[in-house]
Amino acid sequence: MSDLRDRAWARLEAWEADGVGRRIWEKDPTVWADPDTPEITNRLGWLDLPSRMTAKVGEWGSLAERVAARGVTDVVLLGMGGSSLAPEVFGAIVPSGGPSLTVLDTTHPDAIAEVTAALDPATTVFVVSSKSGGTLETLSLFRHFWAWQSAASDTPGDAFVAVTDPGSGLSAMAEERGFLAVCFADPNVGGRFSALSDFGMVPFALSGGDVGALLEVAVRMQAACGADVAPTANVGLDLGAWIGEATLAGRDKLTVVTSESLGAFPAWWEQLLAESTGKEDTGTVPVPEPALQAPDAYADDRLFLVYQLDEDAPVPGVEALEEAGFPVRIIHLLTREEIASEMYRAEFAVAAVGAVLGINPFDQPDVEAAKVSARALMEGDAAETDLAFTALDGLRPRTGDYIAVMAYLPMTDETVARLDRVAAALGQQHRVPVTVGFGPRFLHSTGQLHKGGPATCVGIQVVDDPVAHLPIPETDLDFGTVIRAQADGDAAVLLERGRRVARVGLDGLPG
């Protein structure tokens, strides 16, 4: 679309006149907000992260060798949000050849029980990842597996590696309990911008991955977005201007599609964009889609970002969208390792989108609300509240809305496939975008957009009654209580913010 191209180019020229590219590298907070706005200057450590992290490749490699020498067959990452999604992408896309990497970022007792049953304590290492060191879900999972490992070993700490910020509670606990290692990340990098830090690199290295190859391509992308690159030539600013100007023009639903081998990437893009821009009643809604539909399935609030690995078959349906006049951008990857460079480009682009929209892309002011609500329910401090859910057939999405399926269920292949069918059926019925998120992981990402973004979110919570009864050691809680409190707490905040929300079981969904 020529109008959007013209708007984006005009934005880049204005940024060039204002020195925006240089000012970002100078960590000038006024690119986004007032000079004294919190969580800007101390959240820009990701800018030169690829080049700085190359110095740690040897350290991570030595740790990986220690793990391999123990005969480890499984690396299990216990994390949430920005601490877990990047390693999941690397593990799914880039061959590693080492121990199997499993990402566990749920509090659903059935999912935890299933993973536990498949592991051998003698050949498993756990990576406990938390920037703050106090993440409820991560610590609960740690306590479960610490007790499980302690029952099999006199030295359970040998099976645990911590990734955290210096001085965190997790750091202190790791020292006290004799963890195999503690890896410290840069505290000036926010969770969702931490893909190329210890949070993303350590789990991949332990699974035999070549972290040096990932950083090598990311360093080249860092240079392509460098301070000495004019905004009109800066590939990160260019992508951000395109997305930001589309959002201002009403095309605020960014549909991200990939060729077959890159299918894990849109979920990472979703958390980055949603949590960074979904605030102050504005934001760009990311819509990961497993496959493109015919152009008449989409309204004029869409734009499309396609990632094509050249060794894969071309993504079907792209030409039809272009011929129908939809804005489409295609990014080609020569190798799988280039997913790391595309993460860096995406981070730079999302920072630029924040500048276009006039918001701070580095904070998450509404994420804490659901945590507080859930915590009150778990501790018995919340008053009895009648959650005023809407009947599913009464939601009636309007033009410009999107449906968010919020599934507090185990993330099995069968359930993912079922919810993808549900999303397709709902999208076809209402002709609006439909996203699918699994709780509680989405609370740390898209949950910000649902509550703080535009009032166009129509929520469908999907809950079940867990089969497993799984207490959380060292506490008075169990995982079933935690995940229901998280669902109830999230619903309470959504309803308080005026969002329309239904609650059903899996069998109550269409499709």
Image (cartoon, helix red, strand yellow):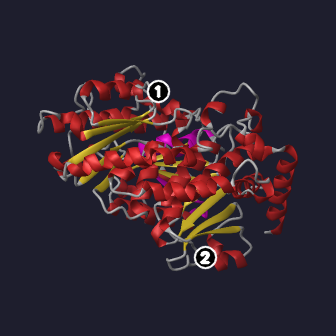
Q: Residue at x 26, y 33 (%)?
A: 143
* Whether residue 333 is visible: yes
Q: Which residue is drawn at 41% across and 39% down?
A: 487
> Mark 1: which amino acid?
Val
Q: Is residue 154 above or below residue 420?
A: above
Q: Residue at x 88, y 48 (%)?
A: 17
Which residue carries the number 2 mark?
A: 294
Q: Quadrant location of the C terminus?
A: bottom left
Which of 218/330 is in front?
218
Is tag 2's residue or tag 1's residue first in the polypeptide sequence?
2
Q: Does the magenta stretch include residue 443?
A: yes
Label 2: how many residues lie within 10 Å, few (<14), some (14-19) or many (20+)? few
Q: Is residue 137 magenta?
A: no
- In this image, 45 relative to 83: left or right? right
Q: How many labels, in total? A: 2
- Residue 166, percent across and down? 45, 28
Which residue carries the number 1 mark?
A: 372
- Residue 99, percent across and down? 27, 56
Alpha carbon distance from label 2 to label 1? 42 Å
- Residue 423, percent across and down? 49, 62
- In this image, 1 relative to 337: left or right? right
Check disc 1 and report its element: helix, strand or loop: helix
Which of 30/440 is in front?
30
Which of 395/355 is in front?
355
- Residue 145, percent across and down? 23, 38
Q: Which residues make up the magenta segment?
A: 429-452
> Mark 2: which amino acid?
Ala
